[in-house]
């Protein structure tokens, strides 16, 4: 499972966390591996299950 970076950025911007969203845009790859970045997602209080792309039919 991968998470599109824009979903993380959007969630942060929705919370008014512009600086964190800007950092994520600069530092994370376009497709984020939640296992590799689990600590960062936890620090940002983001649940990977809420951000994951919908499975393709």
Image (cartoon, rainbow, N blue to C red):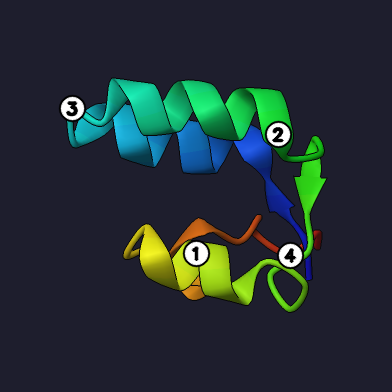
Residue 52, percent from left and from top: 60, 61
Q: In the displayed structure, does residue 24 sit left or right of residue 20?
A: right
For the residue pair 28 and 31, the one nearer the viewer reads as: 28
Give the answer, above or below, for where 22 lies relative to 11: above
- Measured in 3D between alpha carbons, the distance from the residue under mark 4 to the one under mark 1, in whole angstroms, is 21 Å
Residue appearing at x 73%, y 64% in the figure: 55
Of the two numbered discs 3 and 2 in the rendering, the one whose residue sits closer to the viewer:
2
Residues at discs 3 and 1 in contact (Cβ within 8 Å): no
Dot 3 or dot 2, earlier in sequence:
3
- Measured in 3D between alpha carbons, the distance from the residue under mark 3 to the one under mark 1, in whole angstroms, is 17 Å
Residue appearing at x 60%, y 75% in the figure: 38
Q: In the displayed structure, does residue 39 sit left or right of residue 46?
A: right
- Measured in 3D between alpha carbons, the distance from the residue under mark 1 to the one under mark 2, in whole angstroms, is 13 Å
- Measured in 3D between alpha carbons, the distance from the residue under mark 3 to the one under mark 2, in whole angstroms, is 19 Å
Residues at discs 2 and 4 in contact (Cβ within 8 Å): no
- Measured in 3D between alpha carbons, the distance from the residue under mark 4 to the one under mark 3, in whole angstroms, is 29 Å
Residue 8, percent from left and from top: 50, 43
Residue annotated with mark 3:
16
Dot 4 or dot 1, earlier in sequence:
1
Residue annotated with mark 2:
27
Residue 55 — which label? Answer: 4
Residue annotated with mark 1:
41
């Amino acid at each position: 499972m991968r998470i599109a970076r824009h979903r993380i950025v959007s969630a942060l911007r929705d919370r008014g966390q512009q600086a964190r969203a800007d950092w994520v845009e600069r530092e994370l790859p376009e497709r984020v591996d939640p296992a590799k970045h689990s600590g960062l997602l936890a620090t940002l209080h983001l649940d990977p299950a809420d951000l994951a792309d919908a499975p393709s039919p």
